Image: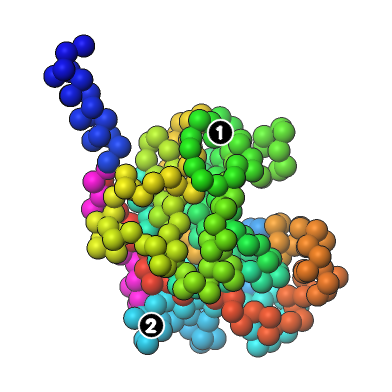
């Protein structure tokens, strides 16, 4: 192969690995509140929760902007009333759906690290679940210490040969994989103690950046003190960010399994994850016999179970 051919090949590889992104949508402040729908039906994950519509949430002061924090969006839960009908909370879904992109979420505070709570920032396909996929970017339950990143798909998608800094907890993304628990999916657990819950909040939060293209789905986390300059300047370049916390791909047709995805932010309680593992957590189990009892009878425990969102930006190539 000639030098000129080698140079052309190398240049092509650089172009492939260094995508150039431009801002498509910036969800922040009142604009974020107006650009999302408010799910108010029964929780699909069987949570001990009552999701409110936007009008009710504003009346209950569980939703709004924080003027002295640059109009960060506040998304809270009821922390004053006992309730056997489900704790009041919110589940927001973007009106707009996406196919590929770089999703950059600057989050100052999240509801994690509290027994009974199950918060998540995620992407969900618009088809019958899990036909069009699910990408759990920022998620955990109870007093979990680090972030769990997970994909849920139909058969034919697995993690193989990708490199990342987290720990692979399950490799098959198929919710019906025979060698995994029902609905487990493929999961990677962060090793960063500031990536979730109390430690995340104590450090002032940070940025989660998710790159979704036809080759892989990659997730980076940057603590508040380590946000790259290109992210702050609005010119993000993932090729400069080093190893992602999670990277899903290698044995998955990404474009077949992930399409028409909406952004979701929610906080639920107990249900199919936080409630299911309650008995396995000595700290939480000591507070009440069941997750449902604890959530119903201890509103004061959820004062800090809120999101404070500076912005969610979506970039496209």
Q: Measuring 72% from the left and 42% from the top, which residue is drawn there?
A: 181
Q: Measuring 53% from the left and 64% from the top, which residue is drawn there?
A: 194
In the foreground, 317 or 94: 317
Q: Secondary structure at mark 2?
A: helix
Image position of 223 with respect to 151: above or below: below
In the foreground, 115 or 34: 115
Could you tell me which quadrant the N terminus lies in?
A: top left
Q: Percent from the top left, x then y, of residue 109?
A: 50, 73
Q: On residue 158, which mark appears?
A: 1
Question: How many badges with numbers are in the image?
Answer: 2
Which quarter of the picture shows residue 303? Answer: bottom right
Q: Secondary structure at mark 1?
A: strand
> Between marks 1 and 2, how big is the CA–CA gap?
41 Å
Answer few, some or many: residues within 10 Å of disc 1's Cα (few below 14, many 20 plus, some between 14 and 19).
Answer: many
User: In the visual, does 312 lie left or right of 300?
Assistant: left
Q: Measuring 76% from the left and 58% from the top, which residue is drawn there?
A: 277
Q: Percent from the top left, x then y, of residue 182?
A: 71, 43
**Which mark sits nearer the N-terminus, 1 or 2?**
2
Which quarter of the picture shows residue 77? Answer: bottom right
Specify start and end residues of the magenta stretch as a single range.
Answer: 19-32
Q: Percent from the top left, x then y, of residue 315?
A: 30, 54
Answer few, some or many: residues within 10 Å of disc 2's Cα (few below 14, many 20 plus, some between 14 and 19).
Answer: few
Q: Which residue is mark 2?
A: 69
Question: Magenta stretch containing residue 182, yes or no?
Answer: no
Q: On residue 61, which mark appears?
A: none
Image position of 74 with respect to 220: above or below: below
Q: Percent from the top left, x then y, of residue 312?
A: 37, 64
């Amino acid at each position: 192969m000639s030098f000129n051919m080698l140079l052309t090949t190398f240049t092509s590889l650089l172009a492939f690995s260094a995508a150039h992104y431009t801002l498509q949508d910036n969800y922040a402040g009142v604009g974020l509140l107006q650009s999302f729908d408010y799910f108010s039906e029964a929780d699909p994950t069987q949570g001990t929760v009552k999701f409110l519509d936007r009008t009710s949430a504003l009346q209950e002061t569980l939703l709004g902007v924080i003027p002295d924090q640059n109009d960060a969006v506040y998304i809270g839960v009821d922390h004053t009333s006992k309730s056997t009908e489900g704790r009041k909370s919110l589940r927001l879904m973007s009106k707009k759906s996406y196919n590929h992109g770089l999703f950059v979420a600057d989050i100052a505070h999240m509801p994690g690290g509290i027994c009974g709570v199950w918060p998540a920032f995620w992407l969900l396909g618009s088809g019958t679940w899990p036909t069009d996929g699910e990408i759990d970017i920022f998620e955990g339950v109870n007093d979990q210490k680090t972030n769990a990143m997970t994909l849920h798909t139909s058969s034919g998608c697995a993690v193989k040969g990708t490199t990342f800094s987290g720990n692979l907890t399950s490799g098959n993304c198929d919710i019906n994989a025979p060698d995994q628990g029902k609905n487990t999916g493929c999961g990677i657990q962060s090793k960063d103690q500031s990536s979730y819950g109390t430690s995340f909040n104590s450090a002032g939060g940070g940025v989660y950046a998710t790159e979704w293209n036809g080759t892989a789905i990659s997730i980076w986390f940057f603590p508040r003190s380590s946000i790259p300059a290109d992210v702050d300047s609005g010119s993000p370049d993932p090729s400069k960010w080093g190893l992602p916390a999670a990277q899903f791909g290698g044995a998955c047709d990404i474009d077949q399994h992930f399409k028409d995805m909406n952004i979701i932010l929610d906080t639920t309680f107990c249900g199919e994850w936080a409630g299911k593992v309650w008995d396995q957590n000595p700290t939480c189990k000591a507070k009440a016999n069941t997750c449902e009892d604890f959530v119903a009878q201890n509103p004061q425990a959820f004062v800090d179970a809120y999101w404070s969102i500076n912005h969610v930006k979506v970039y496209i190539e």
